[in-house]
Amino acid sequence: MGCQSKMALAWVTGAGTGIGRAVSLELARRGWIVAASSRTESRLGSLAEEAAKLGGSVIPMALDVTLRDSVDVLVHHIENEIGPIDLAVLNAGTYVQFGASEFSVEAFQDQFDLNVMGTVNCANPVLKFMRDRESGHIAVVSSLTAYRGIPFASAYGATKAALTNMCEALKPELEQFGVDISVIHPGFVKTPLTDQNEFPMPFLMEANDAARRIVDGLERRKFEVTFPRRFAFLLKLARCLPYSLYFAITRRLVKQ
Ligand SMILES: NC(=O)c1ccc[n+]([C@@H]2O[C@H](COP(=O)([O-])OP(=O)(O)OC[C@H]3O[C@@H](n4cnc5c(N)ncnc54)[C@H](OP(=O)(O)O)[C@@H]3O)[C@@H](O)[C@H]2O)c1
């Protein structure tokens, strides 16, 4: 599959706002046909209009990724009625900040249901089609928080670490079937999700910039797409620190 191919088909989840919307527009601008999914139909409609103004093609396909049966029906519909999915960008996700004093099963459940099981629900039917035709590319949107446990992100970080680990595990297996998998580790990106954050967000970047880097990385079939570079470097370095040093840093985040 050539990423520049005019008729290549991408499916993007969480496409209504933020990173997913920007990635959908970037793909459409580069000649992809984009099936765009999230729950709110009006946002998908405006996305399709915006893409059309750029000369691109976005097909709105409302979906709640936590509903496994609905995901199966939609993926079969895309494959049978629109065409084979060349690239699936599994991006739908959320972040709920809470500390140990508000620790709750519900906060974990909601984030795991959407971030982990929503991604798995989508990967499941797509992978079956891709394995059968021995081609295709799945990209999972994780986060730099996957690298190490960060205070006030115990649930979110755990969901993203699970996704990254899943991609690492699947990579050599899927290669046997001619299927590629990528994991995307963004730092802070300005979106409706991060607009709620009241803490300082180092190296915050615009969604359009993030989308360009994501699509550039996917075009090159990179396994890991990570940005911004300096923040990613610092967090990769933190991965190598012994616990004594790492906790000396994260304790300061808790006391602030
Ligand atoms: N922004 C950042 O700094 C950052 C950094 C690292 C990783 N990420 C990851 O990037 C992804 C996108 O985040 P974002 O910042 O762009 O957030 P966002 O602006 O809140 O976008 C999330 C999108 O997911 C959709 N969505 C939510 N629940 C859904 C569901 N059950 N089924 C289908 N779609 C659903 C939302 O639309 P509806 O509500 O209409 O469904 C929305 O379009 C997430 O996985 C996030 O964890 C973000």
Image: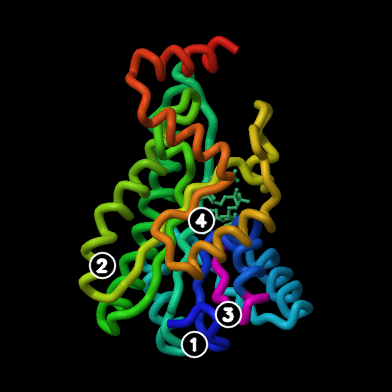
Point out the tag, 3 or 4, that comes first from the N-terminus: 3
> Which tag, 2 or 1, sits closer to the chain's start?
1
Q: How far across and how far down the image is residue 46, in percent?
A: 73, 69
**Magenta span of residues:** 28-39
Q: How far apart, in angstroms, are the residues tagged by discs 2 and 1?
A: 24 Å
> In this figure, which residue is indicated by the disc labeled 4?
92
Residue pointed to by mark 2: 174
Circle 3: residue type: Trp
Q: Amino acid at mark 2?
A: Leu
Please tell me whether mark 4 sits on a helix, a strand or a loop: loop
First-in-chain label (3 vs 1): 3
Q: CA distance from mark 1 to mark 4?
A: 22 Å
- Lower position in the chain sequence, tag 1 or tag 4: 1
Relative to 77, residue 200 above or below: above
The answer to whether the residue labelled 3 contacts the one labelled 1, judged by CB atoms less than 8 Å apart, is no
Examine the rendering and report whether any part of residue 39 can be seen. no
| Residue situated furthest top in the rendering | 255
In the image, taking residue 18 as reference, residue 134 lies left or right, namely: left
Is the distance from the Cβ of mark 4 to the nearest ligand 1 atom less than 8 Å? yes
> Residue 233 location, x and y as percent?
50, 37
Which residue was labeled with disc 1?
A: 82
The image quarter in which residue 47 lies = bottom right
What residue sits right under mark 3 in the picture? Answer: 32
Q: What is the C-alpha distance between the residues marked 3 and 4?
A: 20 Å
